[in-house]
Image (cartoon, coloured by chain):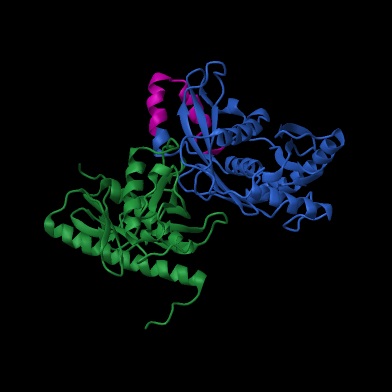
């Protein structure tokens, strides 16, 4: 282990032995979470999420395109994350690296597999034209726990997204398509106005790390750097588990996993309330 | 091309401004935790965030200059910052803008003090509505101050242009798309040195002079806002000698 992390490790481990964290939090306590929506006027939906010093911005753009051949009646969703050099001295410019691809995929999976977006309602002409949702995640300030911040930002942005069917751009695009696909008329009659995305109850992701036999939720950057293993648990409003992902080379015992799940349900509930409050639900 | 939209009505522009008015500017200094210096700036509908890292060892090493620091500005547009989603990553336009901004900033930074180092400036355009490069330079300059990078002056940028035959300050979105000329200018306000100058469109010599003077005037107005924002964070101005 390089010098600096090993000094940090000693410091954090010694604190943990006294039952403390460097920033004074309890081990199952999140940093302060702030959610601000509608921050980007050019985006169809947007949200800025702060967890402590970590800041993430998610923006949603909508377009009309072709569906995948294996899901001809479903809208298309794409998630991309950019770990831009603005956010950390360690992030470099260039094409997406492993870390940003993992982040984008974990966020994407959380939304896709839990079927938060009812993609079948985003079909305009089966096999031909569907709505495409682009979720772009911009990391602004990196101080640990990007997974939770990025997932939460994406959810809040989706919640506030309005499909701009009344905009000049989509009006003329749909009109042109109508010549080729006359069935669009019914779709247009059913959707006369800008509409919100068809969304269901979102599961909330909570991440914990383990170092030297202590488990810390919402790891700060320092804690992340010394973590032996990591577990992300997504839970829904009924307290059921919807997704899990373990990372890094260390291990958990069954008891530890049960503890993490319990804490994730408790924190997930609080975070969900915050999310709903921020989007006016 | 004849504009379909009237850019002027009763001496007022589309957004209600008079010819020599700036859009509204809001500046926040030191908004990021990790960066050594940072600035969030709203200029009309533009939202820009700039961060500075360094001086630090320039990598890869062959980019190092044994006599001075290199200045790497990176202008990047968020995918959701424009009407039609932009593919993430650099394109030809942003690469060019990054280059001219780096060069403009390098002129005022005391680069000789940091041989072999790089000073990295990230400029992220989060919401775009005409004039992003001027907003970017203006924000980057404040982020450099916030990072404590020694400079001869605080650079500042502003554009002027021509719409329907009239010279106006700080083009808005429709004016940029439908207008006759756009002239972004960055200066060192203390000396008046021109650090960045670009033009597209069509201007007579006389019009150029008028537009240039107007852009410089705009720069000085924005410069005052920069200083005000910095003083708000860092206290009072040292007594004039």
Name the side, left or right, on which B177 lies relative to B204: right
Q: B39 or B35: nearer the eye?
A: B35
Can you say which quadrant of the picture contains the N terminus of chain A?
A: top right
Whether A190 is among the magenta residues is: yes
- Left/right placement of residue B99 relative to residue B50 reads left
In this picture, is B20 found above or below B196? below
Coordinates of residue B195 in the picture (x, y in percent): 28, 58
Q: Residue at x 41, y 34 (%)?
A: A171
What is the tally of numbered marks visible in this picture? 0
Q: Residue furthest left?
A: B205
Q: What residue appears at the point 73 percent right and 39 percent down from the top-left corner?
A: A228
Is A142 covered by the magenta stretch? no
Tell me which segment is drawn in magenta: A172-196
Q: Is residue A48 left or right of residue A177?
A: right
Q: Nearer the viewer, residue A61 or A21?
A: A21
**Residue A95 visible in rendering:** yes
Q: Residue at x 33, y 53 (%)?
A: B172
Percent x, y of residue A259: 84, 40
Give residue B37's position: percent from left, percent from top: 49, 59
On screen, residue B114 above or below A238: below
Chain B on-screen colour: green
Q: Is residue A274 visible?
A: no
Farthest residue, direction right: A255
Residue A231 at x, y = what percent? 74, 37
Looking at this rendering, what residue extends furthest in the front direction? B66
Which chain is represented by blue in the image?
A
Is A277 in front, or is B97?
Answer: B97
Above/below status of B14 relative to B77 = below
Secondary structure mostly seen in the magenta stretch: helix
């Amino acid at each position: 282990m390089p010098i600096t992390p090993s000094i940090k490790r000693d410091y954090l481990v010694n604190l943990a032995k006294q039952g403390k964290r460097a920033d004074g939090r309890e081990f199952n306590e999140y940093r302060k979470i702030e959610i601000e929506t509608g921050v980007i006027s050019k985006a169809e939906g947007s949200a800025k999420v702060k967890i402590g010093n970590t800041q993430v911005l998610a923006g949603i753009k909508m377009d009309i395109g072709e569906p995948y051949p294996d899901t001809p009646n479903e809208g298309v969703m794409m998630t991309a994350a950019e770990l831009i050099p603005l956010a950390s001295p360690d992030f470099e410019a260039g094409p997406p690296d492993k870390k940003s691809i993992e982040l984008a995929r974990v966020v994407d999976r959380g939304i896709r597999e839990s079927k938060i977006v009812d993609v079948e309602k985003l079909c305009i002409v089966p096999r031909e034209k569907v709505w495409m949702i682009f979720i772009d995640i911009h990391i602004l300030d990196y101080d640990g726990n990007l997974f939770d911040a990025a997932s939460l930002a994406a959810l809040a942005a989706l919640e506030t997204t309005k499909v701009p069917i009344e905009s000049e751009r989509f009006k003329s695009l749909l009109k042109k398509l109508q010549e080729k696909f006359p069935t669009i008329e019914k779709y247009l009659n059913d959707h006369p106005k800008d509409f919100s995305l068809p969304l269901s109850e979102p599961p909330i992701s909570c991440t914990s790390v383990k170092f030297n036999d202590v488990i810390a939720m919402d790891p700060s950057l320092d804690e992340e750097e010394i973590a032996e293993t990591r577990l992300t648990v997504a839970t829904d409003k009924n307290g059921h588990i919807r997704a899990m992902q373990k990372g890094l080379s260390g291990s958990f015992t069954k008891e530890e996993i049960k503890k993490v799940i319990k804490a994730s349900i408790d924190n997930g509930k609080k975070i969900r309330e915050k999310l709903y409050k921020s989007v006016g639900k | 091309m004849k504009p379909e939209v009237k850019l002027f009505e009763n001496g007022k522009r589309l957004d209600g401004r008079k010819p020599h008015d700036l859009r509204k500017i809001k500046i926040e200094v030191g908004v990021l935790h990790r960066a050594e210096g940072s600035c969030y700036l709203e200029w009309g509908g533009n939202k820009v965030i700039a961060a500075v890292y360094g001086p630090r060892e320039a990598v890869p090493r062959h980019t190092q200059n044994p006599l001075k620091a290199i200045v790497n500005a990176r202008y990047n547009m968020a995918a959701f910052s424009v009407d039609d989603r932009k593919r993430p990553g650099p394109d030809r336009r942003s690469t060019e803008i990054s280059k001219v901004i780096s060069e403009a900033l390098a002129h005022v930074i005391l680069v000789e003090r940091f041989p072999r180092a790089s000073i990295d400036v990230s400029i992220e355009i989060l919401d775009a509505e005409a004039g992003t490069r001027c907003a970017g330079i203006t924000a980057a300059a404040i982020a450099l101050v916030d990072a404590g990078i020694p400079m001869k002056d605080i650079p500042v940028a502003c554009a002027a242009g021509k719409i329907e035959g009239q010279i106006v300050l700080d083009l808005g979105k429709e004016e940029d798309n439908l207008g006759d000329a756009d002239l972004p200018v960055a200066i060192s306000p203390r000396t008046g040195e021109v650090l960045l100058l670009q033009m597209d469109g069509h201007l007579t010599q006389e019009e150029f002079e008028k537009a240039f003077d107007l852009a410089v005037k705009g720069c000085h107005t924005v410069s005052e806002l920069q200083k005000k924002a910095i003083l708000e964070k860092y206290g009072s101005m040292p007594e004039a000698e």
